[in-house]
Image (cartoon, helix red, strand yellow):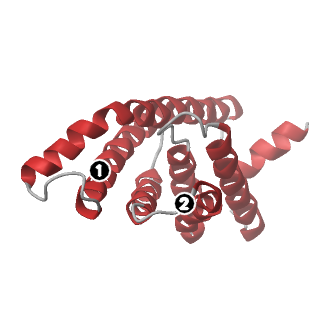
Amino acid sequence: MSKKKRIGLFLLLVLGGIGYRFIWENIPNFEPVTLVCLLAGTYLGREKYLVPFAVMLTTDLYFGISTISIFVYSAFVFTVLMGTGIKNPIDSVKKGFYSSVFFFLWTNFGVWLLFNMYSKDFSGLIQSYVMGLPFYRNTFISSVILVGFVYSAVYVFEKVYKKEWKPSQVLSFIKK
């Protein structure tokens, strides 16, 4: 993909991620940023790792940055890495699921480590995971269903046009 097309896709993913965070602001833990990060991992080069930082830093200027942000941001960097090598919708759903599980485990570990909400022993860590389970539902839904839907649409697009999908084709297809 040319540099110009990569920049266009980068901007599209970042702006989409920012828009998604504001659109679904009132649904706790509904994270379409997972989708954006997986797409960045699948279709971008080295700049893919900037996507979560661009989305999260921009929106966190509005929502607020806290000490847990380092765990959230690093979980999304892991999600970008998970996006590398996605070949079909089934693979995307699996990687969306793995990403959401990692996000849950990693960010709840961060809550346990950084805040005095739970005892600093193994039982406190387990308690932080148990208390976080109600919030995981929306993360799971957004990670698996959104990812599966979008990657399925891309897969169908590839099959209909009998060639590998390139992000720039979507924009030209929309313009027709």
Disc number for residue 108: 1
What amino acid is found at the position of numbered circle 2 in the picture?
A: Pro
Quadrant placement of the N terminus: bottom right
Residue that label 2 marks: 52
| Disc number lying in front (1 or 2) | 1
Using residue 110 as the reference point, say whether residue 67 is left or right of it.
right
Nearer to me, 89 or 58? 58
Q: Crowding near pointer 2: few (<14 within 10 Å), some, many (20+)?
A: many
Q: Does the rendering let one see residue 118?
A: yes
What percent of the width, then of the height, locates residue 156? 62, 29
Say if 89 sits above or below 7 in the image: above
Residue found 72% across the figure and 70% down from its top: 3
The numbered mark, 1 or 2, whose residue comes first in the sequence reads: 2
CA separation in Å, label 1 and label 2: 19 Å
Residue type at mark 1 is: Asn
* Residue at 67%, 33% in the rendered image: 157
